[in-house]
Image: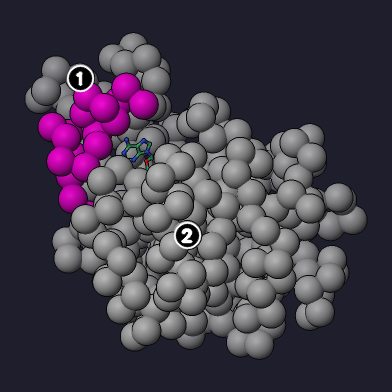
Amino acid sequence: MRIDLHTHSDVSDGTDPPAVLVSAAVAAGLDVIALTDHDTLDGIAEAVASAAAGPVAVLPGIELSTCLQGRSVHLLGYGCRPDASLLAELERLRSGRNDRIPTTVRRLTELGYPITLAEVERHAHGTSVGRPHVADALVARGHVADRDEAFERLLADGGPAYVDRYATDLPTAIGLVHAAGGVAVIAHPWSRGSQQTLPEPVIAELAAQTGLDGIEVDHPDHDQPTRTALRGIAERTGLLTTGSSDHHGTGKTRNPLGAETTDPAVLAEILRRITAHGGERGSFAADGARG
Ligand code: AMP
Ligand code: ZN
Ligand code: FE
Ligand code: FE
């Protein structure tokens, strides 16, 4: 069983529509993917429907923009029902995403990288617009070679064209995932310098106080010492550990589908918890078998 629990479609900042992502997962020889678009559930129905009767099962997911002590933390939610409280928070997050784009465009133009709002919108196919779509507009204008260069030079957190936006407080976001029947896993906890934001005592406190379910350990942004350290933390705090590619289609070349995978026993436990809390199982039956 090859299981990839973190992928993006063009509903957020991936480059493939959900149905195409599912076909790509079939071609990559995967058995299970979770679709985890940023701050939206809009691609889930298409992904689950297109996986029906095919060899790949789809687990509904989401990647929420959260913050802890003013620093960005991404939270994966698996099996969330589209409850009103969660949908309202997603609206708020997407408004924050939209509201910062005109400021970003103005700042880039002042910095000597002119683009227009319309150009950014042309690259955002779904409901959740992000910096990668701004990067795509910069690439199309020939200002930079690819998304990576756009982030390195301009768009990364704290970079010259970075504009802050609303993010949900992390413990609140974990609560929203649980209230919607879902399982909460911190995405790439130690990528891009976030090791200071999430040292072991903070992770342990989140596990004890919020019932955080797990942490993503095997992720392309984590080197081997990081993975070993995170696995130790998970063992000591009783957290599940997942592995995934964080695939973004052609938007991130270092993250091919199935680049990292999750242990089938961990997926079984995630499905057990989703079923126990009445969450959404996507392609899976209540007993965890392929539905
Ligand atoms: P946003 O959703 O607007 O906050 O943009 C963040 C997204 O940009 C991440 O989820 C990644 O998909 C992508 N990204 C690619 N490279 C970087 C980078 N160096 N720093 C931050 N985000 C990046
Ligand atoms: Zn992304
Ligand atoms: Fe992320
Ligand atoms: Fe992601």
- Amino acid type at mark 2: Arg
Q: Return the disc, 1 or 2, that comes first in the chain's sequence.
A: 1
Work out whether 274 lies above or below 148.
below
Q: Quadrant of residue 117?
A: top left
- Amino acid type at mark 1: Tyr
Task: Judge depth for marks 1 and 2 and give the one in front.
Answer: 2
Give coordinates of residue 206: x percent, y percent: 34, 77
Q: Which residues are magenta?
A: 148-165
Q: On residue 113, which mark appears?
A: 1
Read off the residue under disc 2.
231
Give coordinates of residue 93: x percent, y percent: 33, 62
Work out whether 237 lies above or below 151.
below
Is 173 in front, or is 267?
A: 267
Q: Quadrant of residue 44?
A: bottom right
Q: Is residue 262 visible?
A: yes
Q: Secondary structure at mark 1?
A: loop
The reply to whether dot 1 and dot 2 touch (C-beta < 8 Å) is no
Q: Residue at x 40, y 45 (%)?
A: 225
Q: CA distance from mark 1 to mark 2?
A: 42 Å
Residue extending farthest to the right is 53
Q: Residues within 10 Å of mark 2 (few under 14, many from 20)?
A: many
Asked if disc 1 is less than 8 Å from ligand 1, the answer is: no
